[in-house]
Amino acid sequence: MKNIFVILSLFVSCLSVSYAQNNNYCFVYNMNEYIPLYQNSDDSTASSSLYQDTLKENYYSLQIIDCKKDRFKVRIIDENNINTTGWIDKEYCFVWCWLMSSNSIYLFPEPNMVNSYTEISEDDMSSNRGGYVANIIEFDNKSNWIKISLTTKTSVYTGWTLNYCNNIYGSCEGWKSTPPSQIY
C-alpha cells in the first residue's frame, strides 16, 4: 500500500511539473478565414489550415511549444478533440489583456517582477475586437510570462506581462484575476 502511494505521488508530481513548464496558450481571433499552418518553421507553403468557424462555434486553443523567428510551434486543440501540432505565424496568436484594479496593464522589460515596469492605463488603450487584445511575440517556457505587442491610441508597446487571459472566451479564473498586489 505504501508503494502504491509513493508511485501515485511521483506520478502526480511529474504531471504538475510537466504542466507548469508550459502553460502558454493563445487563441486565433481571425474569424471565418483560413489561417495557414506549416509543417516546419521555415516552410514557405502551408501544409494545412485552421478555420475559426463562428457558425458552428468551433474554436481552437493553441498551446505554444516552441518559437522560431516569426512563428510559433503550437499544439492545436478544439472541442472535437483535434490534437495536432504545427507552426503558425505569430501574427495570429492573441490574448486578452487583463486590466487590474488600477485599470491598467503592466509591461516589464524582462519576464520577472524585479525590473521597473510600464503602466498602460485603460484611457490610452484602444478597444479592438470587443476588448483589449494583444499579439503574443514571445513566451517564457519556464513560467506563465508572455511578451506582447499592444497597440494603444498613442503608441505600440512591447513587454512581458502576467496580465492576460489566453482563451477566446475571456473567461480566465485564478491567479490572473487576482489584485495586482498578489501578482506583483
Image (spheres, rainbow, N blue to C red):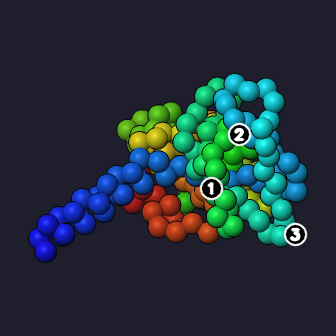
Front position in the image: 68 or 122: 68
Q: Nearer the viewer, mark 1 or mark 2?
A: 1
Look at the picture and state if 10 lies above or below 66.
below
Label 3's element? loop
Mark pair 3, 1: CA separation: 21 Å
Q: Residue at 54% across / 42% down in the picture?
A: 65
Quarter of the figure with residue 85: top right
Mark pair 3, 2: CA separation: 23 Å
Q: What residue did someone put label 1 on?
A: 83
Task: Please state which amino acid type lies under the numbered disc 1.
Answer: Asn
Mark 3 or mark 1, which has the lower sequence index?
A: 3
Front position in the image: 38 or 139: 38
Residue 61 image offset from top left, x and y in percent: 65, 57
Task: Please state which amino acid type lies under the numbered disc 2.
Answer: Ile
Question: Few, some or many C-alpha atoms within 10 Å of disc 2 (few <14, some 14-19, many ≥20)?
Answer: many
Q: Is residue 117 visible?
A: no
Q: What residue did someone put label 2 on?
A: 88
Q: Residue at 64% across / 50% down in the picture?
A: 84
Front position in the image: 78 or 140: 78
Task: Please state which amino acid type lies under the numbered disc 3.
Answer: Leu
Question: Few, some or many C-alpha atoms within 10 Å of disc 3 (few <14, some 14-19, many ≥20)?
Answer: few
Mark pair 1, 2: CA separation: 15 Å
Position of the N terminus, as image quadrant, is bottom left
Mark 3 or mark 2, which has the lower sequence index?
A: 3
Residue 116 image offset from top left, x and y in percent: 45, 37
Report the residue that reaches farthest toward the left: 2
Which circle marks residue 55 in the picture?
Answer: 3
